[in-house]
Amino acid sequence: MGKPQGLVLNAGSSSLKYALFELKSATNAVELVSGLVEQIGLDCGKLTHEPKDGENETVKLETPFPDHKEALSKVIELLTDPKTGQVKDTADILVVGHRVVHGGEKFTKATVIDSGVLDAIREAASLAPLHNPANISGIEVAQFLFPNSKQVAVFDTAFHLTMPPEAFMYAVPKELYTELGIRRYGFHGSSYTYVAEAAAKFLDKDQASLNCIICHLGNGASMAALKAGVCVDTTMGLTPLDGLVMGTRSGDIDPAIHMHLSKTRGWSPQEVDTMLNKESGLQGLCGDSDMRNIQKRVEEGDQDAKVALGVFIKRIRKYLGSFWVELGGDVDAVVFTAGIGENSAQVRELVCAGLESMGLAVDPAKNAVRSPEIRGIQTDASKTKILIVPTNEELSITLQSVKVSNVL
C-alpha cells in the first residue's frame, strides 16, 4: 500500500471540481493535484488537471463527458496514469470528501455517508434544487468507483447551525418553518471553518474565545459573525441568494419585487428567480461580474461601474455595522477571505474607511502587499485586527473528512 490519500469532490449540475491530498496526519494534508471538469452532458466538455509537484504539466482536454460517471472515470485515469499519475493504487484513497450544499437542520458536522444520510440529503434537495441533486450524483458515482473508500458529506450549512432562533427565524407564519424548514441556513461553511481556525491560530487565541466578523468575498459572497468561536449570524439565508451583492446574484431585495414583476411584466416565478440569480448583482448593475474589470472601469471614470462598486461596498458595511453591534463592539478581528477579499486592496480599504472611531483602521502600505500568507493589515493604533486569511475549502473538507471517518 502506498501513502494514504484523500480525494475531495465538488459536483455541480454540469461540473466536477476535485482535489487530491496526501494525508500526512489527521490534521495535516498536502495537495497533490486539483482539477475541474466543465460542461458535463454537453457536446463540448472541458477538463483541466493541475499537478502540484512542479514536474508534470497541466493537462487540458476538450471532449464530451456524457455524465458525472464518465467525467470521474477520466479523472481517475489521469490520477492513476503509470507515468504522471499521483495515485499508485485507488486503494490508497482512504476517504472521499463530498461538498454538499444543503444539509437542512439534520447535520451539524461532516458525516460518514450511509443510506440514511443519502436519503436525508435527497430530502434537503427541495431547499437546494440546483445543488443537492448534483452533489448526490457525485456521491453515487464515487461509491461505485471507490467502493472501499469511506465517503463523507461535508455540508455548507453545518457551520451556521449554532445560530440562535432570533438570527435564523424569518418573520413569517411559524408553520412554514416547522413544516417546510424555511429559515436562515447560511453557506460557505467549509471556508468559514478553515478561516476561523486559521485566524484564531494567527491571533494566538483559543477559538472558543474568538469574536470576529468574517467577510467571504468572491463571486459568491457572504459574511458571518462569530461569538466565542461559533456562528451567531450570517448574511445568506434559505438559499445562497440572500445577503450581500454578488457577481450575478442580487442579495437582499424587497420580496414584493417578485409580485411587482409578475403584474407589470408577466414574469413567471422561474423567470424572476433566474433574473435574481444569474442576471443581477454586479452583472446587473454594470454588465460585468468580475471585480477586477469593474475596478479598472472605475479608474477610467465609468459611472455604472462606480455605482456597482458603491452598492457592493455599502451592503458589506451595512452588515459589518449590524454584526459589530451584535458582538457588542467586542471584535477581535475583521477577516477578509476568498477571491475579492484576499486580492482587492481597494475593496478592503473602502469597507473599513472612516471607521477609526470604532477602532478599525487599515494601514495602506500593509494593505497594498500581495502575499499568499495570513497577515494583519491594521495600523498600530487599530484596536481591532484586520486580517487577510486565504481560504482553502478543499483542505478543510479533507481534514473534516479524515476526522469524522477515522481513517488514520
Image: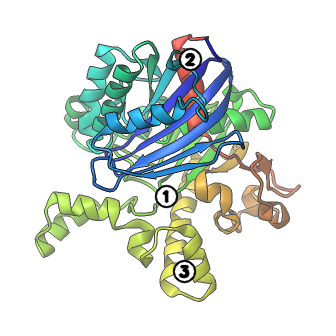
- Residue at the spot x=82%, y=62% of the render? 363
C-alpha span from label 3 to label 2: 52 Å
Query: Taking the image as drawn, is residue 209 in sight?
Result: yes
- The answer to which of 340 and 327 lies nearer the viewer is 340
* Other residues around mark 3 within 10 Å, as few (<14) / some (14–19) / many (≥20): some
The residue beneath circle 1 is 219
Q: Name the amino acid, label 1.
A: Asn
Asked if residue 124 is positioned above or below residue 41 in the image, the reply reads: above
Query: Taking the image as drawn, is residue 230 in sight?
Result: no
Element class at badge 1: loop
Is the C-beta separation of discs 3 and 2 under 8 Å? Answer: no
Q: In this rendering, which labeled residue sits more in front, label 3 or label 2?
A: 2
Element class at badge 2: helix
The residue beneath circle 3 is 306
* Other residues around mark 2 within 10 Å, as few (<14) / some (14–19) / many (≥20): some
Left or right, 107 with respect to 262, comes to: right
* Other residues around mark 1 within 10 Å, as few (<14) / some (14–19) / many (≥20): some
N-term-proximal mark, 3 vs 2: 2
Q: Name the amino acid, label 3.
A: Lys
- Residue at the spot x=70%, y=46% of the render? 389
Q: Name the amino acid, label 2.
A: Asp
Dividing the picture into quadrants, the one containing residue 374 is top right
Left or right, 148 with respect to 92, comes to: left
- The answer to which of 385 and 305 lies nearer the viewer is 305
Percent x, y for residue 6?
Answer: 56, 24
The residue beneath circle 2 is 92
Which corner quadrant holds the C terminus? top right
Q: In this rendering, which labeled residue sits more in front, label 2 or label 1?
A: 2
- The answer to which of 245 and 93 lies nearer the viewer is 93
- Residue at the spot x=51%, y=31% of the render? 8
